Amino acid sequence: KERIQIQKEFLELPVLPTTTIGSFPQSADVRSNRLAFKQEKISAQNYTEFNQQKIKECIQIQEEIGLDVLVHGEFERNDMVEYFGENLKGFLFTQNGWVQSYGTRCVKPPVIWGDVSRTKPITLAWSKFAQSLSKKIVKGMLTGPVTILNWSFPREDISLKESTEQIALALRDEVLDLENAGIKIIQIDEAALREKLPLRKSDWHSEYLDWAIPAFNLVHSGVKTKTQIHTHMCYSEFSDILKEIDAMDADVISFEASRS
């Protein structure tokens, strides 16, 4: 209750604030710009300026329709896991190792080959730019450690718990950088939280949830009380793990129900 009151006074949001999950459509021109940059056909400056223009348009649309908490659209991200894997030490990627996610959507899961760490900020510059465009709050956006692990090929020489903790510590640094830069709301997506639950319900806690939930908590463990933590989940049935979701200690949870 204390945290709710502190955030209410700090954020000054309406009783029922509106927002979106975070990612806007990856249109053909967005994908073409990313490919051109990857193939070194355009400069880093041109790539950045293109995405900044997309962010401006994204912010403008949200302000026009009256949303309360804005997002920057994630135009710089090829995939919610691949993007972070590319910017964290300890990951590598295949060129053509595509895996079907659903329908016609395919992804290239990263391979975790070594200890995971963050060598530089990942989302900070984009979030700061987006926030500079609006007087409204713009959320910082991260993919959570459990989802990054579950959608990667993990190491086999250490436990999943240890690997997830390494990812969580790296993301924790990112969260603190965002907070220090004035980002008031930070969303940590855990779209794949449920995906590694053992088949036997009796094993759910001892083999998975007992380390997966603390890993999420570790990511936001250093923030101030006034900083609001969001999470986003989807594509799953959550009614039988509501107690565990509550233990994640997020202030706001967004459930995407289109495929749940």
Image (spheres, rainbow, N blue to C red):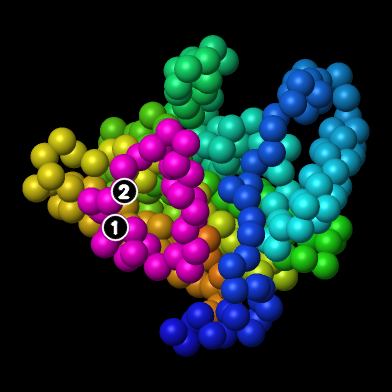
Name the mark on residue 238: 2
* Residue 38 place in picture, x, y as percent: 75, 23
Q: Could you classify mark 1 by the number of other residues whose Cα lies within 10 Å: few (under 14), some (14-19), or many (20 or more)?
A: few
Res 247 → quadrant: bottom left
Q: Relative to 249, is 144 above or below?
A: above
* Residue 85 place in picture, x, y as percent: 54, 37
Task: Report, in whole angstroms, how far the alpha carbon at label 2 lies from the one at label 1.
Answer: 6 Å
Residue 121 appears in the figure: no
Please state if 40 lies on the left or on the right of 121 as rendered: right
Q: Nearer the viewer, residue 65 or 61?
A: 65
Q: Nearer the viewer, residue 195 or 160?
A: 195
**The magenta stretch spans which residues?**
231-260
Residue depicted at x 15% and y 52%: 206
Mark 2 and mark 1 residues within 8 Å of each other at the beta carbon: yes
Residue depicted at x 52% and y 15%: 104
Q: Does the stretch in magenta take in 252?
A: yes
Residue 202 appears in the figure: yes
Q: Relative to 111, is 68 above or below?
A: below
Q: Amino acid at mark 2?
A: Phe
Please state if 106 lies on the left or on the right of 112 as rendered: right
Q: Secondary structure at mark 2?
A: loop
Name the mark on residue 242: 1
Q: Quadrant of the C terminus?
A: top left
Res 139 → quadrant: bottom right
Q: Relative to 85, is 133 above or below?
A: below
Residue depicted at x 68% and y 61%: 69
Q: Secondary structure at mark 1?
A: helix
* Residue 238 place in picture, x, y as percent: 31, 48
* Residue 83 place in picture, x, y as percent: 60, 36
Q: Does the stretch in magenta take in 234?
A: yes
Please state if 206 lies on the left or on the right of 146 as rendered: left
Q: Amino acid at mark 1?
A: Leu
